[in-house]
């Protein structure tokens, strides 16, 4: 069972930046699709909302609320497929628990922002943005 581990969370003032990282507990193929989701602390799993996505070819997708401020990327040639989320110009509404997610592939009619598309998840890392 693949486990994902996030790091890099913390507290920052509005306008600041943070970089989240996510590493797998074992080798995963670079063909995996990976994403970041977020939810209010203590929220139910169904309340997680997609933030960013990257596929095997490096194609990225973003939620409208973070487009232009957040950048998802992954380390090249890394057998544990380290994933990053660079968050710039942070706003108080970005305050949330951020989760890393991965899956071998989306289903045929799957959507990148559907949390049920992802089999492996991290425990989450907290981001607090103060005004």
Image (cartoon, rainbow, N blue to C red):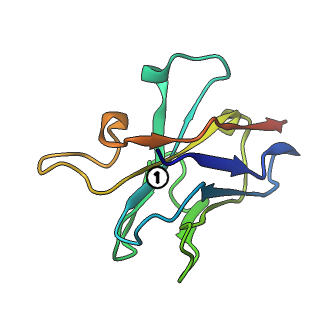
The picture places residue 116, in percent across and down from the top left corner, at 32, 34
Whether 122 is drawn above or below 61: the answer is above
Task: Tell me where residue 59 appears, x and y as whole percent.
Answer: 36, 71
The local crowd at label 1, few if under 14, some if 14 to 19, many if 20 or more residues have their Cα within 10 Å, is: many
Image coordinates of residue 118 in percent, x first then y, are 36, 43
Report the label total: 1
In the rendered image, the residue lying farthest to the left is 108
**Relative depth, front residue between 22 and 97:** 22
Is residue 93 depicted above or below 108 in this figure?
above
Residue at image x 40%, y 75%? 58
Q: Residue at x 68, y 22 (%)?
A: 41
Q: Which residue is label 1 attached to?
A: 35
Residue appearing at x 45%, y 43% in the figure: 120
Secondary structure type for disc 1: strand
Quadrant containing the C terminus is top right
- In the image, 102: left or right of 22? left
Which residue occupies the extreme bottom position in the image?
77
- Residue for point 65% across, 16% down: 42
For the residue pair 115 and 94, the one nearer the viewer reads as 115
Percent of width and height locating residue 80:
56, 66
């Amino acid at each position: 069972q693949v486990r994902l581990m996030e790091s890099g969370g913390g507290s920052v003032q509005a306008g600041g930046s943070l970089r989240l990282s996510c590493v797998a507990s074992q080798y995963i193929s670079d063909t995996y699709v990976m994403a970041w989701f977020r939810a209010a602390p203590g929220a139910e799993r169904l309340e997680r909302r997609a933030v960013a996505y990257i596929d095997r070819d490096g194609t990225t997708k973003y939620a409208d609320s973070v487009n232009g401020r957040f950048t998802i990327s992954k380390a090249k040639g890394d057998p544990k497929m380290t994933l990053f989320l660079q968050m710039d110009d942070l706003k108080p509404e970005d305050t949330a628990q951020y989760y890393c997610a991965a899956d071998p592939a989306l289903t045929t009619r799957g959507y990148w922002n559907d949390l049920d598309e992802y089999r492996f998840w991290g425990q989450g890392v907290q981001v607090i943005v103060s005004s």
